[in-house]
Amino acid sequence: VAAQAAAAPAIECGAQTLTYGELNARADALAASLRARGAGPGAHVALLMPRTPALVVAMLACLRVGAAYLPVDPGYPRERIDHLLSDAAPVCVLTEEGRPAPADAEFAAADPDTAAYVIYTSGSTGLPKGVVVPHGALANLALDHVERFGLGPGGRVLQYLSPGFDAAGGDIWPALVSGATLVLAPDASALAPDDLAVLLRDARITHLALPTAILAGLPVLELPDLAVLIVGGEAVDEALVAAWSRGRRMFNMYGPTETTVAATGSHPLRGRGRPPIGRPIAGARVYVLDERLAPVPTGCPGELYIAGAGVARGYHDRPGLTAERFLPCPFGPPGDRMYRTGDRGRWRPDGQLEYLGRDDGQFKLRGVRIEAGEVEAVLGRHPGVRAAAVAIREDRPGARRLVGYLTAAGELDPAEVKEHARRALPEAMVPSALVVLDEFPLTPHGKVDHRALPAPPEEREEPDLPRSPLERTLCALFAEVLGLERIGAQASFFDRGGDSIMALQLVSRARRAGIEVTSREVFLHPTVAALAEVAGELREDTAAEPAGAGVGELPLTPIVAWLAEQDVPTSRFSQSVLLRTPADASYETLAGGLRTLIDHHDALRLRLHDGRRLEVGPPGTVAPRLSVAQTGEAPSDEQRDAARARLDPAAGVLHQA
């Protein structure tokens, strides 16, 4: 891609844009430095970096030298970061891209069987385990997604999930191998649903992959550019599909980390019936087997086993666990392996797979894979805890949350145990409530009976009354988000069942009420009384723009430069949208509105000189171009073609109405 369209935008992050040529050059330079430090096939390079273009440069540089990159989210607790680095034993740890170095060396194509990346997932033994994914599996995923989702130049892919999750690779590599633009979202933990919806609209995102729970919390805006929507991580219901599939292609994808992000995908969904997880992607094979590893008939439930190009090499330095989960495949050629997912499913008569859940202690919550054993082990390491258990509860429809249950070895403060958990676990894996029991209910076989674990008790004491109008509003918002009848000014948002997703919902509702808070402030000041001390009043930005700002010559933008390099006519590249106007709107009213819009947005006053430079005229120098025709229906193809023909960037005619 870099050789064919060096000036095309590869990565956008806020105001920063990196072209394909720049991405390629920076990756080559960093790859040369990494190779000099011992990075190569069989070696690991840890990337302890925030989500910026430099992180993607570092990932690509690792692939260039044949090393496996290990993304480590700097926001993880220190204890977890220390474990990942100790277990993976990387040859080096990158915390920034570093200085560019000459890169005149050449890099051979990587062996498809060597490791491309290592992703750590929740582990049932109490510690996360590293999944080693080879180059061939990553290439297979990228090529499948390019074709499946119609990616290519002009596409704009939002990278939303933390790069510490394997699903981030499903955004990054298909976008970059297809020539699309990868748009890096701000830190997802600080991005309220309203902000995410506005980002999708303003960044003109065409392809979006989100966990089901995040999509369910998004306000429904008009997103005319969004052509492809991908969900996964949790079951998606019919109502969510009906709300989001209109006017675009929506896919339900399924796949564990051990099978390289996605192993199956649905056809475009339409909101009728229970959404399936579809058929195997290119290069993958899926089997529904019984306990004797025999295929079950269509319609009968069984365990899902996945074979083919996407199967990982195994778990880093865990040969026993690798042998337990990655089995010889009796249906493939000699040496073929299949991954035992632990998921239940069945084939439907139409040849698509239906997901039926799990039977073991693994579950997904808001797209995050959680092993009950890891959370229980962390809780159990607190000196006051004798035993711990966790369960997913849905005591309020649609509000699934992780609840921890403890038996005490002495004096035990649940709030102290929760802080202990936060020091070792990502926030998504910290139980939202902790319940102390005298003893756990047991099954006849002597195991914890998770079905008999009680719901967290409701707060019984009289709540502390709010002391101001602001606190009264915040109390009402806390109760609304948490699904409670009322809440006191001193009650903790998280102790009463809140979590990171609910914190973002609280931020959005507070903004609608005219209150400015951030999700970080909710975590630092989780009570109404404390949050009221730092909350601000939401005001419109009244900063005045300097006179003459945005006017004059400027260099070609990356997309205009890329178009200029193409050996095809580009003057009629355009986009259009159909708007409904008030029935009583006059020509003068519409023309005045267009004039205001053009004067306000500098880019609507651009003129392209000689295909080499851009110039923005002052407000008032570009007149609205409005044609009125009494059609009684949508414009005809002839009318649209005529409007496109009147566009002329060299004459400054960039719009027609």
Image (tube, rainbow, N blue to C red):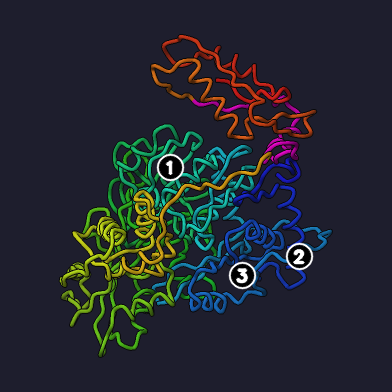
Instruction: Report x, y in % for residue 269.
Output: 38, 38
Q: Is residue 80 above or below residue 618?
A: below
Q: Is residue 288 visible?
A: no
Q: Which labelled disc corresponds to residue 99?
A: 2
- For this rendering, which residue is in front, 224 or 234? 224
Q: Secondary structure at mark 2?
A: loop
Q: Secondary structure at mark 1?
A: strand
Q: Residue at x 65, y 24 (%)?
A: 622
Q: Is residue 567 magenta?
A: yes
Q: Are marks 1 and 2 in contact (CB under 8 Å)?
A: no
Q: Which quadrant of the view contains residue 609?
A: top right
Q: Residue at x 73, y 24 (%)?
A: 650
Q: Is residue 302 visible?
A: yes
Give whichever of discs 2 and 3 has the lower sequence position.
Answer: 3
Quick one: quadrant of the N terminus?
A: top right
Mark 1: which amino acid? Phe
Q: Residue furthest top?
A: 630
Q: Secondary structure at mark 3?
A: strand
Mark-to-mark CA distance, 1 and 2: 41 Å
Q: Which labelled disc corresponds to residue 46?
A: 3
Q: Is residue 321 left or right of residue 383?
A: right
Q: Residue at x 56, y 79 (%)?
A: 86
Give the magenta range: 549-577
Q: Dot 3: within a 10 Å radius of its alpha carbon, few (fewer than 14), some, or many (20 or more) residues?
A: many
Q: Is residue 370 left or right of residue 311?
A: left
| SS assignment for the magenta stretch, majority | loop
Mark-to-mark CA distance, 3 and 1: 32 Å
**Residue that mark 1 sits on:** 251
Instruction: Report x, y in % for residue 538.
Output: 42, 52
Give whichever of discs 3 and 1 has the lower sequence position.
Answer: 3
Q: Is residue 587 magenta?
A: no
Mark-to-mark CA distance, 2 and 3: 18 Å
